[in-house]
Image (spheres, rainbow, N blue to C red):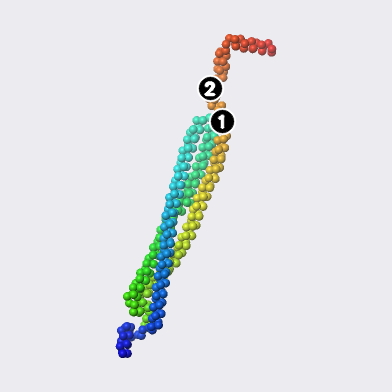
Amino acid sequence: MHRGREKSTAALLGDGKSATLPTTDKAATSAAAVSLFQTTASLENWDAQTRQLQDAVTNVEKHFGELCQIFAAYVRKTARLRDKADLLVNEINVYASTETPKLKQGLKTFADEFSKLQDYRQAEVERLEAKVVEPLKAYGTIVKMKRDDLKATLTARNREAKQLTQLERTRQRNPSDRHVIVSFEFGSLKKYFAETELQRATMDAARTTRHLEETIDSFEKQKIKDIKTIFSEFITIEMLFHGKALEVYTAAYQNIQKIDEEEDLEVFRNSLYPPDYSSRLDIVRANSKSPLQRSLSAKCVSGTGQVS
């Protein structure tokens, strides 16, 4: 009876060592179950964090891309408006050269002011490109980096999930062989390969999870900061341009109002008649008088001489 028990124990241990006590075996089994439960819970938490970062990155990729395209189109429209304004300045100058002096001066002054405004518009275009469009474009690289972080996190998570699945299958396949998944005393405690690999994978995933949490926090913080900076720059650039535009348009309006209509009209009227037009007009009027009118005019002249 005793020999059979010893033989059974020796066959189980292989080296004649005694097995761990049932109490120790139960404690080890319980600890393993707790470890499996904690690992499963952590995996679910990592899944939620990963999805959160994926959603955040995808959302930024979508909307920042749209904003970048629309702001770029806005800048191109502004540049085309500048080009059209330059054409308008040229046409005003050509037309002014054909007009009367005061109108010509007013139009040329307006053209100069309007041309100055296009210099400010050019500065607006350059600043918008550098301060708004380019930072939005840079988010393409940022999104790529975040996706690489996600890939590393998923790799670590999947490795741990694989180890967890292997360990669970081993336990289910050999429910009575506790030495497969719990400690045995062979002079010192030794861990089975599957559990060791699981712990290593758990440590890697935990380290990657911490990095993921830092990445999420950093990404959100940087995104909010960049949005504030980009839109603040846009508002400042537009305010500067429109402030200068108000100054230029005010000066242009005042110059247009200074055009002397009566003086230019007099110049225009004078341009319609030759210089000796008034003397010729007197001759024509004199020749067109009747004999009675000429006689009366002569008497008036004679009477005027006698009085004097």
**Looking at the image, residue 27 lies above or below residue 78:** below
Judging depth in this view, the residue of 215 and 86 nearest the camera is 215
Which x, y percent locates residue 29? 39, 78
Residue type at tag 2: Tyr
Residue 19 is marked as none
The residue identified by callout 1 is 261
Which x, y percent locates residue 282? 57, 16
| Residue 129 in view of the camera | yes
Residue type at tag 1: Glu
Residue 301 appears in which quarter of the rendering? top right
Residue at 37 percent across and 71 percent down: it is: 164
Circle 1 sits in a helix, a strand or a loop, which is it? Answer: helix
Residue at 35 percent across and 73 percent down: it is: 168
Disc 2 and disc 1: Cα gap in Å? Answer: 19 Å
Residue positioned most to the right? 307
Which x, y percent locates residue 138? 44, 55
| Residue 149 in view of the camera | no
* Mark toward the start of the polypeptide (2 vs 1): 1
Other residues around mark 1 within 10 Å, as few (<14) / some (14–19) / many (≥20): few
Q: Nearer the viewer, mark 2 or mark 1?
A: 1
**Looking at the image, residue 177 lies above or below residue 118:** below
Image quadrant where one finds the C terminus: top right
Which x, y percent locates residue 108? 52, 35
Circle 2 sits in a helix, a strand or a loop, which is it? Answer: loop
The residue identified by callout 2 is 273
